[in-house]
Amino acid sequence: MERNVRNKETDKLNIRDLQELLNDMSLEEKIGQMVQITGGSFENDGLITGPEKKNGLGASEIRLAGSVIGSSGADKLKRIQQEYMENHPHRIPLLFMSDVINGYRTIFPIPLAQGSSFDPEMSGRAARVAAKEASVSGLHLTFSPMADLVNDARWGRVMESTGEDPWLNSQFAGAMVEGYQGKDAQFGKNQIAACVKHFAAYGAPLAGREYNTVELSERTLRDAYLPSYQAAVDAGVSMVMTSFNTLNRIPASGNKQLMRQILRDEMGFEGVVISDWGAIEELIPHGVAEDGKEAARLAVDAGVDIDMCTASYAHNLKKLVEDKVVSEDLIDEAVMRILKLKNQLGLFENPYRDADALDEKECILCEAHRLEARKFAGETFVLLKNENVLPLKNKEEKTAFIGPQVYNHEIIGSWSIFGRAKDTVSIADALKKRVPGAVLAEGSAFADGRPGTGVMAARAELHKEDAEAERLLQDAKRIAAEVDTVVLALGEHQAFSGEAKSRADISVPDCQMRLFREVQAVNPNVVVVLFTGRPLDIREISQKAKAILVVWQPGTEGGNAVVDALYGDVNPSGKLAMSFPYCVGQVPVFYNEMRTGRPYGLAEEAYSSTYLDIPNKPLYPFGFGLSYTSFDISPVELDGAVMGKDGEIRASVRVKNTGNAKGKEVLQLYIRDHVAKAARPVRELKAIRKVELNAGEEKIVTFSITQQMLKYIGQDMRYAVDQGKFSVYIGNSSDTQNERVFEVV
Ligand code: BGC
């Protein structure tokens, strides 16, 4: 094959080379490119293991499989690549992919926490660090970002999303893709390809139950769910992963309209589509395919290029082509996309890319990366309540740190597959340096039930025997009674959220609530530091605690970051990216809900849209978060009250730090369309600005309102902007009443 016609600028193969390569490949080889396997079968001297064994893949299928999931390590992947290429008829390199979600070994806060920083740029920086560590370890692609909009806290994977807002999610998705790949998919040194997931609307399973049906109107899908995937596509994302769920009753992995018409034709995605793990074969239990052959046909027809870890493609595509059920053109089209990606990554020139054992030693978990992780964690903490107890005063006050999270090292989130608990700084570790001699106690188990009996966590060590639980509780009470302030570090263990971790009861487990109540009874000066992967029902805590700091699952440097914030070295500035519900019966609850015909507060009370027993409003709304200082935001001023076609209005507020500490405030601009041609949200976030102000300092912050911010999916399913009145709100949470009205003519 002629391989010397190179693109001069990039030194990569030209399309002509790739076409020649494709023409030269056998059907088996082509199908191989469309099959993804785990690394296990390359690691064990030809012994077929794991999913490959279970799926009945043979040695020749493994020899031709085009990509590997889940393995890492520079030396290992170099060896696998070398041996693989030596045995491959066209020496086409493998693509190594894995889940590098909130970091590779240096783990950043979970995505829901990142969303709560309201700082997409920081997520971009974290993605760059993750890409660096992953690339030196031999990886070429990460299955991130997850751009699924979420608003049901029962679903375990809300922790992997940046929250409930379409616009905010879009900012994060775009920033992360650029962080991994470089701007416009440059794939420079230490950059890796990104895969946005899970297309589409995986974050909306009915009743928050994992893998459940998704029922969305087309308008909601387009208005609320597609924008964040679109932002990833616009940022040049290389790959899209299908979702497990159905959409309009058709499972995504066999949904031709979704994958071809919407994703490719309308959204303009030209890269590779991969199924989620096993999702092609799941077309059988979904009840839309009779067997693996039918599943393969549906998926390839829908334009799914790679089968992640089933044998559907490997065992069926050849026969389907030979029987003329599937055209070889479909296979060629898919393989071409895969070859193009390998080429864009420069794998034909250097199949090992940045894999380098020395670089691994140097950069993984290096000081600079840890520092980024610590800084980022500090930006994600949300102060929900503070009755003058925080920040803690080290010298004058005696503080006890109690609770199962005090000693916990598993604070990196359940998707940190390469992260290690041993690398993580717990609160106890951090205190050793910052407050030597601090009083610490475990207080309780993580989960209810005795070892072996709990349903919340299969792991025995997350439970306690009754006698041990009692001893811990009594110790905690004794210690609490002797100090000025108690910091109670409570909440979800990282094993309670993530994939397949739906919860119907989203409260803090009873054993921890008992600790809270009994400690609070002996010392009311309680600060709750809440670790969690999802919004929780914290009604009781919100009434009784003096302060609440939500720290999510903060990552490798979590303990340091928490202690920084408790002692005021860092002033919390996070804002909730997902509303904290009043109780689980209110879920899903989110700020940008649709208007109804009988709105609460406006319609006759007895027949308005509300509950008999609880309020409509969440306990803490989207965008809410306090600071150790206070801010005053002036009424909104507009530079005009009328917007013409393609016009623009500038909206300003003066924000002043009226407290005693330096701090950051996140100004949020929301829009409300007064009269539209379809039901519209009560308001929608359209811009944010994070400003840092010294005590007493003030700044004027100006936003520009454009027609782009006013558009929505109109009656004919196309974007439209209405004429008439709009409100703009600028404030520091989604329930700000700081409003001005303008008109579009
Ligand atoms: C998850 C994906 C993940 C994939 C590969 C699946 O179970 O849904 O998010 O990328 O596994 O690990």
Image: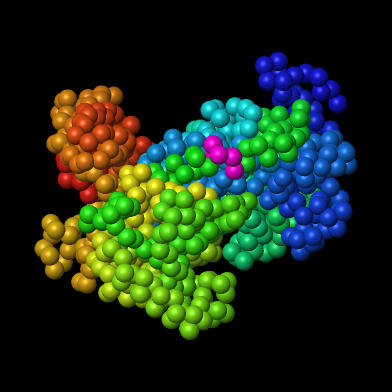
Over which residues does the magenta segment extend? Answer: 365-369
Q: Which of the two residues, 487 or 321, is positioned nearer the viewer here?
A: 487
Residue lying farthest to the left in this orientation: 604
Identified at 48% across, 83% down, the residue is 466
What colour scheme has been applied to the protein in the rendered image?
rainbow
Please state the horizontal and vertical placement of residue 513, each as a whole percent of the image. Answer: 36, 73
- The quadrant in which the N terminus is found is top right
Q: Which residue is drawn at 43% across and 81% down?
A: 470
Q: Position of residue 219 (x, y in %)?
A: 38, 48
> Is 89 part of what is drawn in magenta?
no
Residue 86 appears in the picture as rendered: yes
In the rendered view, tell whether residue 230 sits above or below residue 534: above
Q: Is residue 366 magenta?
A: yes
Quadrant that contains the C terminus: top left
Q: Is the magenta stretch mostly helix, strand or loop?
A: helix
Q: Of 124 and 525, which appears nearest the observer?
A: 525
